[in-house]
Image (cartoon, rainbow, N blue to C red):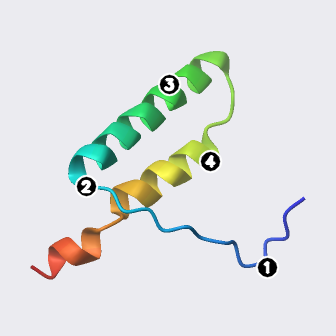
Amino acid sequence: MENKNEKKEQTPVAMDDYEKGISLNALREEKVRRQQRGSPTRELDDLIIKIGASGEKDNRSQ
């Protein structure tokens, strides 16, 4: 079991807007499949938010 106080290793991934869109669509489709099976979607929700928010700081500064 993962300790909440441990720092998670992060791996940066560079994606253009097209790749980001493909990734988000795939995650949303998997979320729907899990919802239909009654499976939890919390991890997918967190990842969708993380990817969706990536790059926002760069866009605001322009």
Q: Is residue 19 above or below residue 30?
A: below
The reply, left or right, for residue 31 in relation to residue 52 is: right
Residue pointed to by mark 2: 16
Label whose residue precedes the other's in the sequence (2 or 1): 1
Q: Which residue, given by chain and number where applicable, does mark 1 sit on?
A: 5
- Residue 6 is left or right of residue 50, and the answer is right
Q: Earlier in the sequence, mark 2 or mark 3?
A: 2
Picture disc at residue 32:
3
| Residue 60, horizontal then vertical, whole percent | 17, 76
Numbered disc 2: secondary structure: loop
Q: Can you identify the residue that label 4 sits on?
A: 43
Q: Which element is circle 3 on? A: helix
> What percent of the width, then of the height, locates residue 44?
56, 43
**Amino acid found under the numbered disc labelled 3:** Val
Q: Determine the secondary structure under disc 4.
A: helix
- Quadrant containing the N terminus in the rendered view: bottom right
**Rendered image quadrant of residue 34:** top right
Query: What is the CA distance from the residue labelled 3 to the residue labelled 4?
Result: 13 Å
Q: CA distance from mark 2 to mark 3?
A: 25 Å
Which residue is pictured at 30% across the width and 46% down the height? Answer: 19
Looking at the image, is 34 positioned above or below residue 2?
A: above
Tell me the mark number nearer the camera, choosing from 4 and 2. Answer: 2
